[in-house]
Amino acid sequence: MRILLAAGAALALAGCAFQPAGSIALPSRVPDAIAAQLVQIGRVIDPPKTGALYAPLQQREPYAGVHVARAERFGPDAERNVLDVFTPQARGAPRPVLVFVHGGGFVAGARRTGSSPFYDNIALWAVKHGMVGVNTTYRLAPQHKWPAAQEDLAAAIQWVRENIAARGGDPDRIYLMGHSAGAAHVAQYVGHPRFHVEPGGGIAGAILVSGVFDPSSMPASPGLQAYFGSDASVYPRRSALPGMAASRLPMMVAYAELDPSDFHEQAEQAQAALCGAGRCRPLVQLRGHSHMSEVYAINTPDTALADAIRAFVFGR
């Protein structure tokens, strides 16, 4: 069945299975029934339909063995300068810290909405696998344009560095993970040292999942223009790629097989920039996954992306 679904996807979604040089394709672990529906949804960004497939697989509160501190303030914006901290109830040695930055097309998104299991699922998974989990948010366009989100990430990282030791985390092992627009914001933070709270960024590594790294090579979508501005002549200066290539920070870049093609191209550009600087790591392609399913699947039996993140953080 899995083979038939993969073949159908390849025929229906021309080019989606292309594997660029220097990449690794992680075999699909998507359950067959969900895989078929992801193919039907196609190479589009559809959080409601995709979320409905994965929500039944996720935990619901209360979370056994996990303490959750909600809405910790790290800046002046009462709604958007907040983060949630997930820690094990039983403390031990200091743990690495996984800070997750959500997407939303630059104009929407939240660390959690109502009783949705997303994105608690990522922080819960982090705690289960030896980390402290932090979900943060940031101010949104069009009210808050570039570089508001990078300023917010800097403030969030500073808060984590100052407060996480008291909660069982290691401030010298902070890993910043972004998805979609969140990955764009993480890349912007890494690639522009003016935002860094410490030399090198004050983090131990960056995980970039289906992000935008060079706005000048993306179609001029409303969301992109809302954040980066309507004057495309400034986009090359706002590209994260030169700074990413110059950084010594370990970075993991991943994307989904069923991502819209722009995200494939952005991932390949990031890979080329890093490899050109002699800092080549495998570019991770998630077979069978879509733009949203790759992160909605974290903390389920589908561990393709989760295993890659854990190997990156723990070096194994």
Image (cartoon, rainbow, N blue to C red):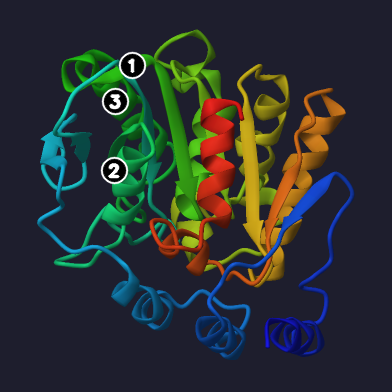
| Mark 1 surroundings within 10 Å by alpha-carbon count, few (fewer than 14), some (14 through 19), many (20 or more) | many
> Which of the two residues, 276 or 53, is positioned nearer the viewer here?
53
State which quarter of the image contains the C terminus.
Answer: top right
Q: Nearer the viewer, mark 3 or mark 1?
A: 1
Query: Is the C-beta separation of discs 1 and 2 under 8 Å?
Result: no
**Tag 3, which secondary structure?**
helix
Note whether 233 is above or below 301 in the view shown: above
> Which of the two residues, 190 or 300, is positioned nearer the viewer here?
300
Q: Which mark is residue 135?
A: 2
Q: Is residue 187 visible?
A: no
Q: Indicate the amino acid at tag 3.
A: Ala
Q: Indicate the amino acid at tag 1.
A: Asp
Kindly indicate the quadrant of the structure image that contains residue 312. top right
Q: Which mark is residue 155?
A: 3
Alpha carbon separation for disc pair 1 and 2: 16 Å
**Nearest to N terminus: mark 3 or mark 2:** 2
Q: Is residue 119 visible?
A: yes
Residue 188, percent across and down?
53, 35
Kindly indicate the quadrant of the structure image that contains residue 277. top right
| Residue at 56% over, 67% down | 221
The residue beneath circle 1 is: 170
